[in-house]
Amino acid sequence: MTDSKRSLWLIEKLYNNRSLTLEEYECLVSERNDEAAELLRAYADRVRREIYGTDIFIRGLIEIGNVCKNDCLYCGIRKSNASCERYRLSDEEILHCAVEGYGLGFRTFVLQGGEDAYFTDDRLCSIISQIKERFPDCAVTLSLGERSRESYERLFRAGADRYLLRHETADREHYERLHPEGMSFDNRMKSLAVLKEIGFQVGCGFMVGSPFQTPLTLAKDLKFIEEFSPDMCGIGPFIPHRQTPFGEKAAGTVEETCYLLSIIRLIKPNILLPSTTALGTVNPVGREMGIKAGANVIMPNLSPVSVRKKYELYENKICTGEESAQCIECLKKRMEGIGYTVVCDRGDIKK
């Protein structure tokens, strides 16, 4: 069997069974070609429409601070980056972002930031409670890194609905090559399991094209997603930042990212799958390409304009144009132009 025909056979198997072996995932990743990508895209779009129709869910992203205790080798807000202009939003600024977002039609707010001791459980619980009290029809998603089980439980009781924690890679050796000593692959995986046990809608994710990534490491990511069965999965192309040890590494591609988005949609048809800002940074129509490949979530930026450039995980992040929350009408037109509809909805996963 030729590589091309084997890819098509594996796609048919995945579409019908929702599962492949690790070796089969590795083959599917390594034997990517245009014909396979188009078949995957068509199947991903089909199963997504069966569950969600043409609905695209929007999340209002509030980047609450770029102070971080960690020194991840790929991240622009890493602790060692002395050129990073640090900031923290006040409780009032965060709430103001939510008020503005609600008026624009957002019914999910994503509070994202570095691992920063300033944002204590007490402070976060107060912010979450205020948002939920003012907007009881909204969901609150957190993306604040690794915390203790007790912390996660408090945040959940305060009203947080979802938690995003990218696993970055499901391969231990690869994880250790992306992170400094002191960061633990086991703790990252344990944190994801704890979040699910507590009752959060849980999201994981990884970078596409990150340094030292191979078809096998990607196959392990796909197998992990199959077995862990997250509610959400955020993937986007790796984009280097000059103030990191990986500043000269090559970026990931939109094409491979879209290929993997389609595979993830087939693995778990009801998953909430963002078309990320990173896709739009690499290619002006990258987010549209992600939607066509099976994604059904977009996260426009609700952060104050004054800090958007400061939350620079990677270089040249788009942050003040049509990806911003204030340009929601522009975004709606772009989605309508490719046959999809932005909806004002919490956008919970459909079980």
Image (cartoon, rainbow, N blue to C red):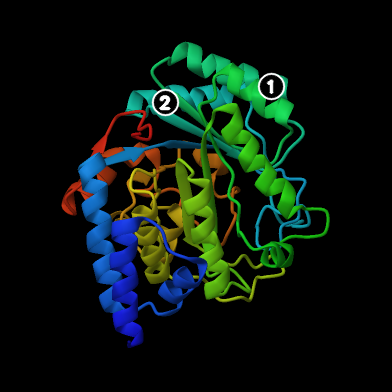
Label 2 neighbour load within 10 Å: few <14, some 14-19, many 20+: some
Identified at 40% across, 67% down, the residue is 254
Q: Helix, strand, or loop for circle 2? A: helix
Identified at 50% across, 72% down, the residue is 23
Q: Nearer the viewer, residue 127 or 184?
A: 184
* Distance of label 1 from label 2 (alpha carbons): 21 Å
Q: Nearer the viewer, residue 27 or 285?
A: 27
Q: Nearer the viewer, residue 209 or 82?
A: 209
Q: Amino acid at mark 1?
A: Arg
In this figure, which residue is indicated by the disc labeled 2? 100
- The residue sitting at the bottom extreme is 2
Residue 68 drawn at (x, y percent): 73, 45
Residue 88 drawn at (x, y percent): 67, 35
**Which quarter of the image is occupied by the C terminus?**
top left
Label 1 neighbour load within 10 Å: few <14, some 14-19, many 20+: few
Identified at 20% across, 42% down, the residue is 53
Q: Nearer the viewer, mark 1 or mark 2?
A: 1
Position above or below: 115 against 39: above
Identified at 57% across, 21% down, the residue is 128
Residue 286 visible in rendering: no
In this figure, which residue is indicated by the disc labeled 1? 123
Residue 205 visible in rendering: yes
